[in-house]
Image: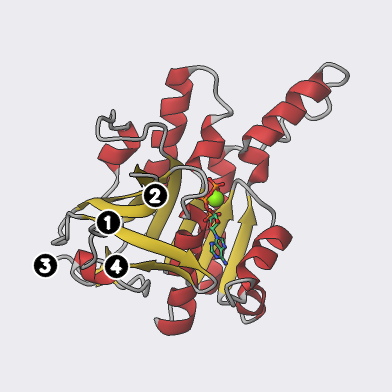
């Protein structure tokens, strides 16, 4: 049996016979606002406070100050965890689309920014250092989608994504990578990343008869028995809760 790591997220662990496969990569795929950042951060915070597992967050979307102030809304004090040397935040926004846009704009006037963009290799080195420094067991990279916007060429884009996932899989941590779901509905093209990782969780908003419901689906979790139903989840001031035994749409 594959050893599992509890996420500590209400309702989610029972959908995966206990949790995520240990030291593997789990991809969280979801539409904008689906709760990818919250789910991933909740996994880290539960690790810190309930399972004695130190953590590193790599964000391509937001800086540390922004992240800390968003998370304190849920009562998750990552700043304190950092001060206790249990948590590290890596600001990788320089890898993102915003950095690219800025660079392109600046280049028209000056070449001074050239080479200052963070490379994937440098990022992985930084991440390895932080993992060793605090003995981290959990890692989140949020979000691969921001990296993709850097590449216009689809082949370069694929290579960047697969390189990054390969590098992450050597770290020996239980890792969540978030990414955007570009299609909604039943018919989807699976991406390279989905084949490379051990687990995939989909977060979607479904519409039916004028109402909407947030739906979670454990698409795959290698080595772990799963509940393969699409089940409802909620987001409130405590974060995410999953309801494995409830049906998506209440009977009318
Ligand atoms: N206290 C709260 N109560 C209810 N819903 C909340 C609360 N805080 C945040 N949300 C919901 O959480 C969602 C945002 O979650 P999150 O930032 O994790 O999404 P995301 O998938 O990472 O989005 P993005 O693609 O923009 O990064 C929003 O839809 C918001 O409505
Ligand atoms: Mg997000």
In terms of secondary structure, where does tag 4 sit? Answer: loop
Q: Vertical placement of 78 versus 58: above or below?
A: below
Give the quadrant of residue 225. Answer: bottom left
Q: Whole-Å distance between the Cαs marked 2 and 3?
A: 40 Å
Q: Residues within 10 Å of mark 1 (few under 14, many from 20)?
A: many
Res 170 visible: no
* Position of residue 226 in the picture relative to residue 121 (left or right): left
**Mark before the other along the chain sequence, 1 or 2:** 2
Q: Residues within 10 Å of mark 3 (few under 14, many from 20)?
A: few
Q: Which mark is residue 243?
A: 4
Q: Which mark is residue 224?
A: none
Residue at the disc numbered 3:
1
Pick the residue in front: 94 or 50: 50
Rendering coords of residue 232 (x, y %): 32, 59
Q: Whole-Å distance between the Cαs marked 4 and 2?
A: 18 Å
Rendering coords of residue 180 (x, y %): 45, 40
* Position of residue 93 in the picture relative to residue 87 (left or right): right
Residue at the disc numbered 2:
211
Circle 4 or circle 3, nearest the eye: 4
In terms of secondary structure, where does tag 3 sit? Answer: loop
Residue visible at 60% across and 46% down?
Answer: 60
Residue at the disc numbered 1:
248
In terms of secondary structure, where does tag 2 sit? Answer: strand
* Position of residue 50 in the picture relative to residue 84 (left or right): left
């Amino acid at each position: 049996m594959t050893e599992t790591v509890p996420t500590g997220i209400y309702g989610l662990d029972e959908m995966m016979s206990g949790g995520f496969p240990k030291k593997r990569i789990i991809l969280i795929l979801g539409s904008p606002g689906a709760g990818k950042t919250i789910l991933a951060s909740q996994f880290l915070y539960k690790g810190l406070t309930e399972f004695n597992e130190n953590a590193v967050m790599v964000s391509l979307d937001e800086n540390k100050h922004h992240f800390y102030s968003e998370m304190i809304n849920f009562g998750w004090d990552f700043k304190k965890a950092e001060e206790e040397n249990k948590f590290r935040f890596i600001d990788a926004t320089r890898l993102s689309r915003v950095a690219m846009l800025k660079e392109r704009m600046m280049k028209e006037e000056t070449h001074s920014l050239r080479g200052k963009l963070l490379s994937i290799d440098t990022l992985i080195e930084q991440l390895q250092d932080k993992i060793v420094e605090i003995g981290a067991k959990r890692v989140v990279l949020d979000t691969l989608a921001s990296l993709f916007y850097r590449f216009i060429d689809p082949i370069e884009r694929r290579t960047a994504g697969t390189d990054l996932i390969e590098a992450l899989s050597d770290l020996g941590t239980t890792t969540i990578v978030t990414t955007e779901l570009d299609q909604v509905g039943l018919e989807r093209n699976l991406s390279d990343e989905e084949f490379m990782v051990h687990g995939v969780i989909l977060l979607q908003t479904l519409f039916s008869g004028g109402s909407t419901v947030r739906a979670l689906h454990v698409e795959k979790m290698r080595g772990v028995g799963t509940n393969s139903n699409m089940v409802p989840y909620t987001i409130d001031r405590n974060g995410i809760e999953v309801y494995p035994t409830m049906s998506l749409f209440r009977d009318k």
